[in-house]
Structures are given as structure tokens and as C-alpha cells.
Amino acid sequence: MSHKMWTRLFFVVTLLVFLVNSYQVSCETADTVVVESIPPEVNTEAELLIDENLLGDENEPRSYRGAQLWRLSYKDQQFKSAVSELQKTYKTSIWNIQMANSSNSYVDLFVKPAVVDDAKEFLRKVQVPFNVIMDDVQDAIDNENPPLEETDLWQNRDGHPMTWTAYHNLEDILQYMDFLAKSYPNLCSVKTIGRSLENRPIKVLRISNGDPSNKAVWIDAGIHAREWISPAAVTYVIDHLVANWDSETLDVKAIDWYILPVMNPDGYAYTHKGDRLWRKNRRRHINRLCNGVDLNRNYGHKWGGQGASRQPCSETFAGSSAFSEPETKSVNDFLKKSGANFKASLSFHSYGQYILYPWGYDRKVPADHQDLDRVAREAAAAIKNVEGKVYTVGPAGSTLYPAAGGSDDWAKGDLKLKYSYTIELRDEGRYGFMLPANQIIASGEESLAFARVLARNLVNA
């Protein structure tokens, strides 16, 4: 028997042992477990899942040939039951939810190729309408990031490899940050605030004119590894600020910008070499049947509440404790100890086109929610002026679904920052997480528009 066959047999045997040992625990904790990204009205008991990457070679790219993305239109209780059944029986996963608009509510479901036909038949029987918005997920993966043109490759002669016509790997992004610190020492500096589980650096770029009276804004991206547009858009913001600093508005120049383009470096690197749709970090769990912690459920404010799973194989696994992961702990420690005058936090994600503010852990709002909403709507208007894209605005817990342990609640609840937002970038579902690279620049311009609105409100407060 080959080594690979022995390895797979080992995993199968381990799985059987783990299932038996975990059955009682799973039953005892099922009432507190929430499957990924489901609002409470369509929650279902979490099934024990397996990270399929561990049954093969993790170093080989995973194929999603034949997988599909469906959109189920919300109508009635039958819809809620159907979503629950699709997750429980057919192991589908939710990519996006639109519940804020009662006339156009829907759920986007990722469907594995092996169950496509059976799941379609099920929906027809229960008469729940759906559309196939992505016929083959692998095609979208193959087409999202075309090879760089020769002229783009020549960018290296300037000391860095970055372009905004393609998605770049972690090494390119880190090299670009170091290049800026070296080339613009009076404006830019780079600090390694920690290291990931796999010992990759967690680097923050500071853009500042050095005025000690400046207020500070924190920006992060790439918490979820598969959301490639967020690091791309944020590095575009960096590039624009640095290249156009002298001509930027006085409000923008009166801010110290602290920017972390890739908060989940291990996961991001893995999406480029292994599994394009990987979400979590790369935490290796003791049972070895699954990997990863959802870093956006690992922050300390209301950790472990609604929308955060206790099952290590769930895509929303919150970790063993608040800040159990070096990535979130490094960010928490840095912001608390930096001495900067932080007033706001922006966390960029995808997809769905939302501007969300606390609270996320519940359907409540902070006392100053009117201020949060006003600035968010100003930003949405500025974004619309870029290319006409409409972003939905509202508190995270009621606009989407409750999800405890998020970065926005932590920034507002623990750090007491006035403004804290999660921005879900393009698009609304046609491409999902595989937004074509030709939309990077426009997404970057939309992100920059938000930053300018925020700066104006902070400086003129």
C-alpha cells in the first residue's frame, strides 16, 4: 500500500474514533452552535464537518470543478426550512445573505458538485425558487486573475512588484510595504506587530506627516483569506495616499493612517497555493480532522456568543478563547499599547456591498448609533459617486445576522473608538469571492472615498 493510501486510511480511522468520542459532546452543545453565516431564523444544528483538504495533499491546489453558487429567494417559512435542510443534508455553505431589504431578500449557497443534482431536486419538490448564479466555481477561480502583462512585470524595476490589474501574493505585498518605508522615510514606516502561527510577519504600514496632534485611523484587510479584493483595495488606498500625499485634502493629511493589508497571512498564502476558498487562519487542531479559526469571531468583545461556533470544523469557529490566535492578539496588543490617538477603525471584507457598524453580537445599537449611521451614509453616497455602486448601510446584527467576536464590536466596545465599521466590498454575488481583477481599481477608489469621508468627519468633529 502506498504512503498516500496509508495516510488516507489513517484519517478515516481517526475520523471514526473522533465521531464516537464527540457524539455526546456534540449533542450537549448543539444549542449553542451556529452554522456559518445564518441568521437566527434559519439556524440549524451544526453537523460535524471534516476539512477535506486533510484527506489529500494540502500542497496541491484544490479543484472546485462542478461546484455551483445558487441564490435562494426569501419568501416564507418554507424558505427557512429549505436552507436548514440544504446545510444539514447536502452540506451546502452560505456565502452571503441579504435580509435588510424585505422585497429582495436572499441567501447565496455554495453547492458541492457531488450533491448538485440531488439538491436541485429537493428544492423543486419543496417549491423554493432559486437561480444558479455561478455554473462552475472553478471557472470563476480560473478567470479572476489573468497573468500579468509584460509591461506590468516591468514594475519590478521600480523596486516593487505591485500592480492593481492583478491579485498579488503575500510576498509581493510585504515587499511593497518595505519599499514604501525605504523610499518615503518621512511619510511611511513599517512595523512588524507580531507573527502568525506559521511564523509569517504581521506588518502594519503607518502613513503620517508626523504631527503629534493627529488623530489615528486603523485599517485592516484580509482577515478572511479568500476575500482577495480586500487586500487589493487597501493596498490601492496605500498607493494613492503615498503617491498623491501633497495634493490630498488637509483632512486626509491630518490623520495618522495605520494599515494592515493582510491580517491573516497564513490563510492568504494558502489560498494562493492550496485552497482558493479557504476562510480561516491555519491553526492545527488536536484532532487533525480540520484546521483553522475564524479570526473575525476571535476578538474579545462578547466572544463566543451568537453566530460564533464552538465546532473546530465550522467556518465560524471562534477559537478556544478570545484572542487565542496570534493574529488577533497581535492586533489587540498593538492598538492598546501603541500610544496613537485612535478614533476609528475600518475592516475591509467581501462580498455583498455593505457598510456595517456595531453591534454585531446582537440586534442592538450603541448609544451614538445615529453618528455611526450618518457617517456611513455619507460614505455610501461617496462610493456611489465612483461608479454608481449601491452599498447597504446598517448595524451588523440586524442588517445581516448576529455574529459575536468581530473586530468592529471590539473596536467600539473594548477600545471605545467613536467610529467602527466593517465594509463588505464588491460585488453583490455575480462573482462572489472571485471578483475579477479588472475591478480592483474601482474597488480601491470606493475604499478611498470612504477613507476621505471618515477623515473629514474626524478632523471637523
Image (cartoon, rainbow, N blue to C red):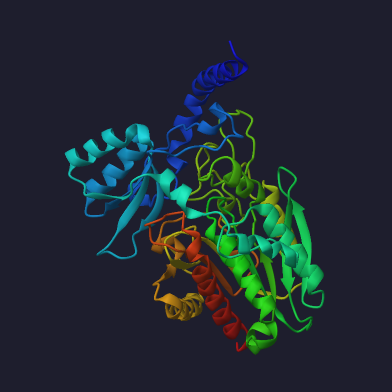
Image quarter of the C terminus:
bottom right
Residue at 74% in and 62% down: 334
Q: Residue 433's x, y, as percent? A: 47, 54
Task: Give the answer, above or below, for where 16 lies relative to 267.
Answer: above
Residue at 63% in and 88% down: 249
Task: Give the answer, above or below, for where 242 lies relative to 164.
Answer: below
Task: Give the answer, above or below, for where 255 lies relative to 111.
Answer: below
The residue closer to the viewer here, 371 or 206, is: 206
Query: How many numbered dots are placed on residues in this image?
Result: 0
Q: Is residue 409 visible?
A: no
Q: Residue 6's x, y, as percent? A: 59, 15
Q: Is residue 27 visible?
A: yes
Task: Give the answer, above or below, for where 379 lies relative to 228.
Answer: below
The residue closer to the viewer here, 158 or 237, is: 158
The residue closer to the viewer here, 298 or 391, is: 391
The residue closer to the viewer here, 335 or 424, is: 424
